[in-house]
Amino acid sequence: MENSSQRKLKLLVLRDILLEETDDEHGLTMPQLLDRLENKGISAERKALYDDIEALEHYGLDIIKRRGKHTEYAVGARQFELPELLLLADAAQSSRFLTKHKSDVLINKLEQFTSQHQRTLLEKSMHVEGRIKMQNESVYYNIDTIQATIRDKKKITFQYFDYGFDKKEKLRREGNTYVENPVDLVYKDEYYYLITYNETHDKFLTYRVDRMKSIKKSDEPLACTDKIRSFDVQEFTARAFSMFDGETIGAVLLVDHSLIGPIIDRFGKDVPIYRIDDNTARITVHILKSPVFFGWLAQFGTSARIESPQSLVNDYKEHLQSIVQTYEN
């Protein structure tokens, strides 16, 4: 007769066998379960195993019994369904922010939530052609430091760099440390950005996390200002294009009806749209004026144009003329 310790161990091993080898399409018969336990050095009787399966069901494991010539036992519903795991695996595999190694590690962890039969689907779930992956895995862990700094309401210090023609890092400000008030961390256009409030310039700034290094939580407390307390990250990111800084402008655009989808993708369904005729609509949006916004607008050619304000029209014309002038020269 098995003692209490042996019964507990048998229950755990039986649970692992069912999770590892069974799913909606694959089951194990009672003789197969007994054989699997025997291979792991655990002896069991058929009658006791029925009680064990019932105990696992009471515990919450969704065990399906397939009636037939030989009854099969399998795990049905799991913590993650296969389509959910495929979605997460695709996200990890395609994310530009994650290194290839970190993507592989995350996918391997996701594989533990399904059976051995379905793991190959996760491994082959997606091929991303020409995907440029992040090279520096420390960025992944720097996010923890940033989040802890925001949580503890402290200022943050870091260095910031660009790349030179030699593809090497070139520190801005001659390597001097930035001291900022961290406000929020957002993921946009395949990159993480830290939004900060700069007291000297009295404005919100954005920094790409993968361009930050030597990130540290300062002992200095976060500045207590009304602007930080009332900051709306959703409104800010809706106005920002690729998180470039710029002057906030209320703009009226005239767009072709074929652009309604891209407009909603960019600004959301709450964007005011006034139908002028079957081909044209007028929309009102608030944007951060920047070269990135002009680039976004230019991709639509003559299907979209700025109606007002005139100052934004003039700036856009100058932007386009400067590009044309470059090629003429």
Image (tube, rainbow, N blue to C red):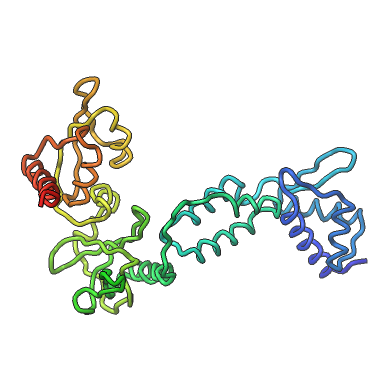
- Residue 246 at x, y percent in the picture: 16, 54
Q: Is residue 150 above or below residue 56?
A: below
Tell which residue pokes out farthest to the front in this image.
Answer: 329
Q: Is 66 displayed left or right of 328 in the figure?
A: right
Tell me which residue sits at (28%, 63%) in the image. Answer: 183
Q: Is residue 325 above or below residue 299?
A: below
Q: Is residue 193 above or below residue 84?
A: below
Tell me which residue sits at (75%, 58%) in the image. Answer: 15
Q: Quadrant of the N terminus?
A: bottom right
Q: Is 139 displayed left or right of 225 in the figure?
A: right
Quarter-of-image position of residue 14: bottom right
- Residue 69 at x, y percent in the picture: 90, 39
The one of 315 and 269 positioned closer to us in this rendering: 315
The one of 280 and 20 positioned closer to us in this rendering: 280
Tell me which residue sits at (21%, 42%) in the image. Answer: 298
- Residue 218 at x, y percent in the picture: 29, 77
The one of 67 and 176 positioned closer to us in this rendering: 176
Q: Is 84 displayed left or right of 116 in the figure?
A: left
